[in-house]
Image: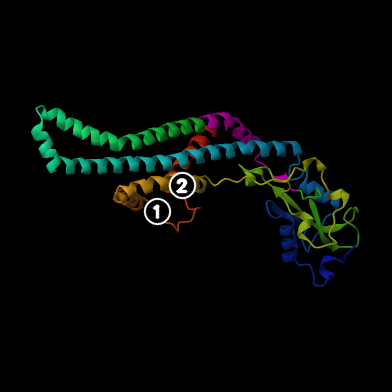
Amino acid sequence: LETDVCSLQKPPVTQVKMQDQCAKFCQPRAVSMLIGSTEYGFNAGDSNDICLPPNGVLSHDPTLLANCGQWSQGFQEIEISAQRLIEQLEVFTASRLEHSSTLRHATLQIQAYVTSTEFAHGILRQTDKVEFFTQAVNQRLNGAMNSTQERLLSEVQKLKSRTASLKSTLDTNMQLLQNFLQQCNTLFAGTGSQQEYMLDICSQSGSACLEHQKAKHVTCCCGYHPFTAFGEKPPATVIEGLESFESPARVSATRRLQADEVQDAEDDGAVDICAGAWTAAQPKVQEAYERINTVGSSAIIDSYHQTMQQKYGKSFCGFQDENTDEASLSTQARGWFALVLSAFFCSVL
């Protein structure tokens, strides 16, 4: 025994301290499971029987856990595809507003022209006044509308393409997500960078080491549920383990699980669909708004934003306010994402 029994240490290891050490060992992704208390303890064999298969509350299947990580990434692909669709929806909406503003501006110009002296003199000289009037209107209307109409049609095609892409992604990844939901809904034994899975906190009574048959120690193991990393890249380790404690903390070989669970550490690849879509769409939306402002039709943007704000309140996030946090969520994006999630879970369940 390297340290005194729990109650005789200075300061004593109370029940609260036991729970704190266990939580520290299991952070950041796992649920702490304290085995023992100030009143009773267990030896290593009994602690393992509580934690690990075949009789324990936790599973230990490195292959299945790795598969769960891979299957859950199917949702990340859906998130990315949904983000691209929502981004394009925002750009299309801005393009639609631009097309409306150009039509309004062209109409005002035509109205001004047909009431001008130039038009009055021109039509007075014409034999076919209907043809002159029609050509004059069409010439000014088409000249103003051609470029915005081309942009609008282009954005429509992109929206159609990204809608098809999302459907294809859903079709491709649905089975992976079903595998995850059906096979990964369990707690696995969490391990640290040294494959440690159990923390020996202190001896509740007696001086026998944890591995001794008559030992009565307070220990801790960690339950990790794959859903805590759903849609993310599988974490290299799920608990900080001994890295949470100062030296000379170490782990006995008998308290390590097989090393085949170790994976290369990578970025978790987390996706914020709505914030990502808003950020990606912002440059193109701002370009469209600038073209709208150029023709003096900023009132169309204001009217659209006022309508959205009246309908959704502060939940609506527009593109005009320079102080808007890029992580804000647009209501349109939330609506589309809710539609995607509803379709997914209805299909699965």
Q: Is residue 109 magenta?
A: no
In the picture, the quarter occupied by the N terminus is: bottom right
Q: Is residue 188 one of those drawn in magenta?
A: yes
Is residue 300 shown left or right of residue 115?
Answer: right
Q: Nearer the viewer, mark 1 or mark 2?
A: 2
Q: Which residues are magenta?
A: 167-190
Residue that appears at 28% across and 35% down: 143
Amino acid residing under circle 1: Gln
Q: For this rendering, which residue is in front, 210 or 103?
A: 103
Task: Give the image quarter of residue 348.
Answer: top right
Q: Nearer the viewer, residue 206 or 117?
A: 117
Residue 182 drawn above or below residue 44: above
Colour pattern? rainbow
Going from the N terminus, do you reach mark 1 or mark 2 first?
2
Q: Quadrant of the C terminus?
A: top right
- Tag 2 residue: 283
Task: Bin the neighbour count of mark 2 within 10 Å (Cα to Cα): few under 14, some 14-19, many 20 and up.
Answer: few
Residue 4 position, x and y percent, is 87, 67
Q: Nearer the viewer, residue 41 or 329?
A: 329
Measure the C-alpha gap from mark 1 to mark 2.
Answer: 11 Å
Image location (x, y in percent) of residue 308: 35, 49
Query: In the image shown, does 315 or 176 lie closer to the viewer?
Result: 315
Q: Position of residue 295 (x, y in %)?
A: 30, 47
Q: Few, some or many C-alpha atoms within 10 Å of disc 1 (few <14, some 14-19, many ≥20)?
A: some
Count of marks placed on residues: 2
Disc 1 is placed on an element classified as loop
Reading the image, the residue beneath label 1 is 320
SS label for mark 2: helix
Asked if the residues shown at circle 1 and circle 2 are in contact, with their CB atoms under 8 angstroms apart, the answer is no
